[in-house]
Amino acid sequence: MQIDPHTGLLQGARQCPSPNYNARPHPGDISLLVIHGISLPPKQFGGDAIDRFFTNCLDPAQHPYFQEICNLQVSAHLLIRRDGELVQYVPFIERAWHAGDSQFAGRTNCNDFSIGIELEGSDDLPYEPVQYRQLVAVTRLLQQAYPAITRERIVGHCDIAPGRKTDPGPAFDWGRLMAAL
């Protein structure tokens, strides 16, 4: 597994391009890794709803929750599914729309300088061991490609949008991640 520095694509990840991205205002400023949790519908795993959500193809008739979110235009750089599959929606060199209204270390608009990784899961259900293994492997690659992403600059969505977001939630084992890095 490796990251192509020119395209920002992760070799070995399934590519599912999202239209929900744009250019970073300062392309050389990639200095934050944001960990998210997602499941669609909530607390249900598998299926293609996450792919459809990030590609603006979510059918609101498929589930009542989808009616609430089907018009949002959001994305992430990468998803780690429950079985460890890696799915890339946006090249790392581009600005994915994952953080929303956010702030880190006095800087707003975290999408400008961050990479967003979604873990298929929910705040209160344990994540799978294979997800941690994949997250560690990808994080190491990202830290090699973007050295400004230090251990202190790996955060949860809850940390950059407190009061608005709770993911990856209390079920995410930060100690496990940090010990493995």
Image (cartoon, helix red, strand yellow):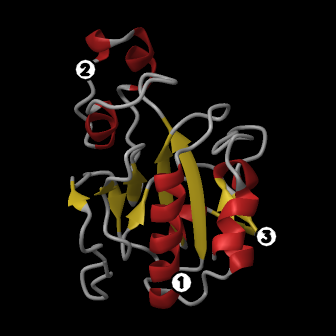
Question: Which label sits on residue 143?
Answer: 1
Residue occupying the point 30% across, 16% down: 60
Give the camera-side residue of 38 and 124: 124
Residue 7 seen in render: yes
Residue wearing tag 3: 106
Q: Residues within 10 Å of mark 3 (few under 14, many from 20)?
A: few
In this rendering, the answer to whether 160 lies above or below 50 is below
Please name the amino acid that badge 3 sits on.
Gly
Residue 98 seen in render: no
Q: Secondary structure at mark 1?
A: helix
Quadrant hosting residue 53: top left
Q: Residues within 10 Å of mark 1 (few under 14, many from 20)?
A: some
How many marks overall? 3
Please name the amino acid that badge 2 sits on.
Asp
Q: Position of residue 41 (x, y in %)?
A: 43, 22
Residue wearing tag 2: 59
Disc 3, disc 2: CB below 8 Å? no
Which mark is nearer the camera, 1 or 3?
1
Q: Position of residue 158 (x, y in %)?
A: 71, 47
Q: Secondary structure at mark 2?
A: loop
Residue occupying the point 26% across, 52% down: 18
